[in-house]
Image (spheres, helix red, strand yellow):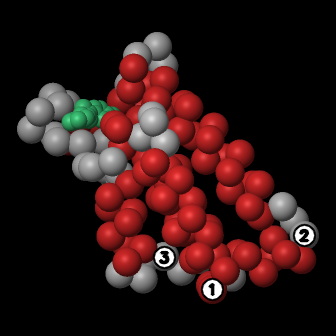
Amino acid sequence: CTKKAKMAKDNTNGLAMCRVLLAELEAHQDAWPFLTPVNHKAVPGYRKVIKKPMDFSTIREKLANNQYLNLETFIIDVNLVFDNCEKFNEDDSEIGRAGHNMRRFFDERWTELLM
Ligand SMILES: Cn1cc(C(=O)NCCN2CCCC2)ccc1=O
């Protein structure tokens, strides 16, 4: 963690990076399962199994409402999207694979931006 990294974790730059990262997540070709909240009426069991649903549109809303203190609190919500996906979907499924791909992309990207 460099001095620059420390800087980026605080409010200002951290939030600029949240916007950049979220735009890239939304634009990724494997983002389609995560763009909007899972429709629990259409997905049996989801509401019971997943205690804290999260998706990219909800993260965008929270960012717009200034609900993220810094990059860390933003990263927690993004990881919640991927953790929910792993919990509910087989690794060897279309949505499961999309989740793994998106998590790998995100991990590589934010560490790139911070280092
Ligand atoms: C993350 N996740 C997503 C779903 C899902 O079905 N998403 C809808 C995907 N469709 C895309 C175009 C219309 C809707 C199910 C389980 C799950 O864990």
Q: Which residue is mark 3?
A: 68
Report helix, strand or loop for mark 1.
Answer: helix
Q: Which residue is mark 2?
A: 2
Three-letter amino acid code at disc 1?
Answer: Thr
Q: Quadrant of residue 64?
A: bottom left
- The residue located at (17%, 31%) in the rendering is 43
Q: Are marks 1 and 2 in contact (CB under 8 Å)?
A: no
Q: CA distance from mark 1 to mark 2?
A: 17 Å
- The residue located at (48%, 76%) in the rendering is 68
* Disc number for residue 98: none
- Decide which of tag 1 and tag 3 comes sooner along the chain: 1
Three-letter amino acid code at disc 3?
Answer: Tyr
Mark 2: few/some/many CA within 10 Å (<14, 14-19, 20+): few
Instruction: Where is residue 59? Give x, y as percent.
Output: 39, 63
Q: Nearer the viewer, residue 89 or 48?
A: 89
Instruction: Where is residue 110? Give x, y as percent.
Output: 68, 56
* Disc number for residue 12: 1
Q: CA distance from mark 1 to mark 3?
A: 11 Å
Q: Nearer the viewer, residue 31 or 53?
A: 31
Q: CA distance from mark 3 to mark 2?
A: 22 Å
- The residue located at (62%, 84%) in the rendering is 11
Report helix, strand or loop for mark 2.
Answer: loop
Three-letter amino acid code at disc 2?
Answer: Thr
Give left or right: position of 27 versus 34: right
Report helix, strand or loop for mark 3.
Answer: loop
